[in-house]
Image (cartoon, rainbow, N blue to C red):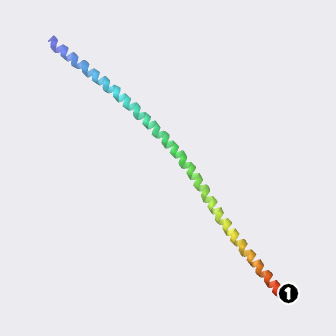
Amino acid sequence: MVKEEADLLERLRLRVHQLLEQDKGLRQRVASLEEALRQSEQGKAELEQRNLQLSAQYANLKIAKAMELSEEDSQAAHRRFVSLVRQVDECIALLKS
């Protein structure tokens, strides 16, 4: 009976040792996954910040483009006005002669 008890105790000791090693491995795995999660969350926060910056830049570009079109329209109107003034000057010159 002593032999059976000794075998049983040895198997129990081995099993406890295996469970402790498995627990150690699992704790390391959890720590590794927690670190990966932390890095992913940090990357996500950085990407969200970059997205906000790019959205602001895009909005500024849209405004600048709208203003650029307005400048082109203004320049075209100015050219048309100058052309009309020349035509009026030509008409006045014709009337004087």
Residue, x 77% and y 77% (percent of image)?
Answer: 85
* Label total for image: 1
| Above or below: residue 96 compared with residue 14 | below
Q: Is residue 17 left or right of residue 7?
A: right
Q: Kindly indicate the quadrant of the structure image that contains residue 33.
A: top left
Q: Is residue 84 left or right of residue 19?
A: right
Q: Kindly indicate the quadrant of the structure image that contains residue 27.
A: top left
Residue 92 rendering spot, x and y as whole percentages: 82, 84
Q: Which residue matches tag 1? A: 96
Query: 37 or 5: nearer the eye?
Result: 37
Residue, x 25% and y 18% (percent of image)?
Answer: 13
For the C terminus, give its image quadrant.
Answer: bottom right
Q: Kindly indicate the quadrant of the structure image that contains residue 7.
A: top left
| Above or below: residue 73 compared with residue 89 | above
Residue, x 40% and y 33% (percent of image)?
Answer: 32
Residue 50 rendering spot, x and y as whole percentages: 54, 47
Residue, x 23% and y 19% (percent of image)?
Answer: 12
Name of the residue lying farthest toward the right? 96
> Callout 1: helix, strand or loop?
helix
**Tag 1: amino acid:** Lys
For the N terminus, give its image quadrant.
Answer: top left
Name of the residue lying farthest toward the left? 1
Q: Residues within 10 Å of mark 1 (few under 14, many from 20)?
A: few
Q: Is residue 62 left or right of residue 17?
A: right
Residue 79 rendering spot, x and y as whole percentages: 72, 73
